[in-house]
Image (spheres, coloured by chain):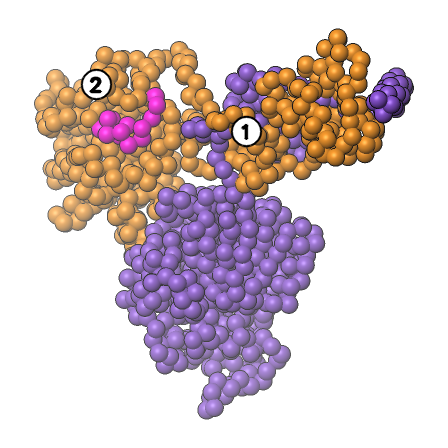
Amino acid sequence: MMGELVEMHREFVRYYGPDTDGLPKWMEGEKLNEFPSVLQKAVTEDKGNGLISLMPLYSSLKENDVILFSDLSSLNDMDEDNEKLDEHAMDETDSLLCRHSVLRDDGADADEKILFLCNSDDVTEEIERISFICSCIISAIKSGGSVLIPIGRLGVILLLLELISETLHSSSIKVPIFMISETAAEVIAFTNALPEWLCKSRQEKLFSGEALFGHVELLKEGKLFLFPHLHSKGLLAAWKEPCIVLCPHWSLRLGPAVHLLRRWRADRRCLLVLEQGSDAELSLKPFMPMAIRVLECSFLSGVRAAKIDTLLGVLKPKFVMLPEGLKSRYSSKERPWSFLYYSKGKTIELPNLQEDFEVHLATDVALGLQPRQLNETTAVARLRTKLFVSSGQYQLAAAEKQSDQSKWHLLQRDAVDPDRLLPALQEKGMVCSFAADDKSAGERSVLITSPGYALVKITSDRTVIYCDDERTSKHIYDALSSVCNGI
Amino acid sequence: MAIECLVLGAGQEVGKSCVVATIGGKRVMFDCGMHMGYHDRRHYPDFARALASWGAPDFTSALSCVVITHFHLDHIGALPYFTEVCGYHGPIYMTYPTKALAPFMLEDYRKVTMDQRGQEEQYSYEDILRCMKKVIPLDLKQTVQVDKDLVIRAYYAGHVLGAAMIYAKAGDAAMVYTGDYNMTPDRHLGAAQIDRLKLDLLITESTYAKTIRDSKHAREREFLKAVHKCVSGGGKVLIPTFALGRAQELCMLLDDYWERMNLTVPIYFSAGLTIQANMYYKMLIGWTSQKIKDSHAVHNPFDFKHVCHFERSFINNPGPCVLFATPGMISGGFSLEAFKKWAPSEKNLITLPGYCVAGTVGHKLMSGKPTRIDLDKDTHIDVRCQIHQLAFSPHTDSKGIMDLTEFLSPKHVILVHGEKPQMAFLKEKIESELGMPCFYPANNESVSIPTTHNLKMSTTERFITSCAAEQGKQSLRKRNLIHGTGTSEVNVTDEGEAEGVLLMERHKAPKILCEDELLQVLGMERHLVQFEAMSSSRIEAAVESELKRAEAADLGSEEK
Ligand SMILES: [Zn+2]
């Protein structure tokens, strides 16, 4: 099966080429999943001109015919854009709920890096949210409690780390930060080694010789500790409470979060930061009753409805695919593209987009053509070429060999008129005359006696040239085609 | 249409790489290097002369963009001069690592030339910073639309961190400029990688046009043995290198060896900048070899365990040590200072890179076994130390050049960055073995490469599918030939090619149709023309009788 995949990929590259622009990129499922990230950024910018920073990206997408929004459930919140942070209590636990406009995307984790690693002004809102979380964390620490953050969003974690350490530093509080995860060391090393994927301001750090993220310093200064497990060697030695623990696992059923939450649940000074989305009540059930404070927060992902038209205006697709559920909200009235609506498990047939194919004809082939005028407005020319397929383009190059003589034919508008053939042959210096017989059978014969002997038999749909000399045959053929209204 | 290729530097020489290619009407400058062997006007490419020949008012309007392949000074050294002194303000492209690391190389060398030779300073530190600010960073395989018609793309070249081969396409013309590259992976970098592209022109380096190298490991062992022997005899090892690239590779080699052999002799880096550079290497792990990428989270190989803090006065300390000092080739700076101190003792060892530019101390040491180096009329150095020439190099060898050329199968090849006799040899080899026309112009010469030009037309699905169907039959027969190629050829029949008709109608775009489609569209009919031999007896008889009849008729008419 692997072999087949490799083979398929080869075929793909052969036809569509290694070029990264154009359709093929979007045909990869992975790329489709990443699409929301493109849209995500649009969310964070206020006006249509906010898209300017993405123009280079879009310009390479422009020729696409179909745009698929993999998940736009986010649109459901389109009217709640400006809802402010609000807090209210949950029944039994003293918890904070920070509910905000949620633009949700299921597979958002991979996308976040791109958006959340940016530290520029255009993500103000997200920064604001993270600042809020940070202030809650600091106040918990100040009250002597520890903080448990089982959030797996890498972008959020990196921003939180920077912000927390800054705040701790400025208020001269010294508490250790632990990151307990089997992938912690790898992730932290990795994030400092991908400058190409970060926002402009982070990239500037590379060019001016600084580390890309604050955590490099934190590790060096011994403020941040990375351990794969709770029972890892050295963890106990470094452990000190109060502390801040990041241990990505949202379910609260696996990993170090379970143990730590058991340890801290009765302490009302402690704080648990959860990501909204999974059923918090259900997640927390095994830990009840609990006194620990719970901060449930949501993070930005998806696209804001208002941005879609702007985006589509830039991309100019022929078709846009939306989830079925949005049919009533989004119709293609007065829009230059049409919407297709999809639902789970149903195949959608796209109308054939291509009526004509584009080919590239080498100039030397074009110059070698011998067009024939059929009437005042139409000319035709026969074409013999080699077809190449390269990087998704059809290319016609010069043919190398002449075709086999025995199979020639003419394309004619009116039947070949034998009466016109005679003068044409004579013009070429041939001595010829009609043979007298067979006129009744619809067949006329022309006899050529000089420069060599030849006989030409003409019916309405066929001409047979009997001749031993190749050059003479060619001359006869040329004369024939010259009297034929065609090629 | 043609690609016009003007070689401003590295034509039949190594040094100051700079080629301006006019492709699809767009002028692109590949590399903008300096020549370290010269300190007169041959130091930089002759920009003024090029500008005059283009007849443009200034460089910004003359060029669409400048693309730099890597941070070596012979590829980027003239860039600050070109932007800040000559006044080029157009786009400049280079990869992320090159943009990050180039300022170090430039500044290090600027200081050397300023301190040591009192050479007229051509550009300042501020110039370097201003110049680098204008640079647009490139990622590998990222297709960059420079303007409406011109597209460039970078491919991994090995050689040094961030080195790239550059693909450029404008209209129908496409080319690759390789810069320096390595076709075999080394201790920290992978081998060059590129797609099979349809190219009119390949411009390749040819430093080792005639050399075929054997196993690298043997050469590495030789180097380690020489170093170990020297330090165990209480000697000092001087390794003159540039701040980046070779320094990191050799240091990885030594650090590893020190670990295995339990050595405690200190390893020094002469300038703080190399330590700084190591930090860059850590951030740019993504551009190193797969092996390093896979393991860097556990152990970053650029965290050198045995490298110790260094101060300038240490060169007077007794006892063995290993010192990495800039610049390479001992053309000045601290490497020259250490050389002056250490060269007179036979206990010590100087390692030289595989290639040294003419005019440098390194070059003098390489040619023969000099016992005395005259720096100027007052300074003489007695050379009694051991000299070890590194036999491994981050450049591809002759086989690598041939392999890449064959893989890319361009229509034409231009050789740069090499020495004339070797280039002549390689040109012969490329022309005879690969059948591609090959050139190796000297500096300030230009070569014109014809390119195929295409007209865009529309065609019907039927025409394409009929070709494709034929191709299917064909490929069954030739299955093994089409694997993994970027361009496949559709041979419609064994002998011939695709047949179609071009239809041109007034006020409509020309269109290619199958014959059947044309017949339908224009209401035409097919008239078969068959060729038969006279010899088929029935016909011969018929002709015979016909001739007699005609003769008789003639006679009859004459009788009238
Ligand atoms: Zn180089």
Q: Is residue B452 left or right of residue B100?
A: right
Which of the two labelled residues, at mark 1 and mark 2, occupies the earlier sequence position?
A: 2
Is residue B218 among the parts visible in the rendering? no
Q: Residue at x 46, y 70 (%)?
A: B35
Q: Is residue A400 above or below residue B391?
A: above
Give the vertical position of A328 relative to A294 (above or below). Answer: above
On screen, residue B242 versus residue B474, left or right, reads left
Q: Look at chain B in the picture and name its colour.
A: purple
**What chain does badge 1 belong to?**
A
Characterize the local packing of mark 2: few (<14), some (14-19) or many (20 or more) Cα atoms within 10 angstroms: some
Q: Quadrant of the C terminus of chain A?
A: top right
Please state which of residues A231 and B238 is positioned toward the viewer in this rendering: B238
In the rendered image, residue B221, in percent from the top left (x then y), is placed at 61, 61
- Residue A163: name its quadrant: top left
Residue A179 image position (x, y, % from top left): 30, 39
* Pointer 2 residue: A76
Name the main secondary structure of what is drawn in magenta.
helix
Say which amino acid is labelled 1: Gln
Q: The residue tagged with tag 1: helix, strand or loop?
A: strand
Kindly identify which residue carries mark 1.
A373
Where are the magenta residues, as a range? A307-319
Q: What percent of the width, then of the height, locates residue B466?
A: 60, 22
Q: Is residue A326 visible?
A: yes
Labels 1 and 2 in the same subunit: yes
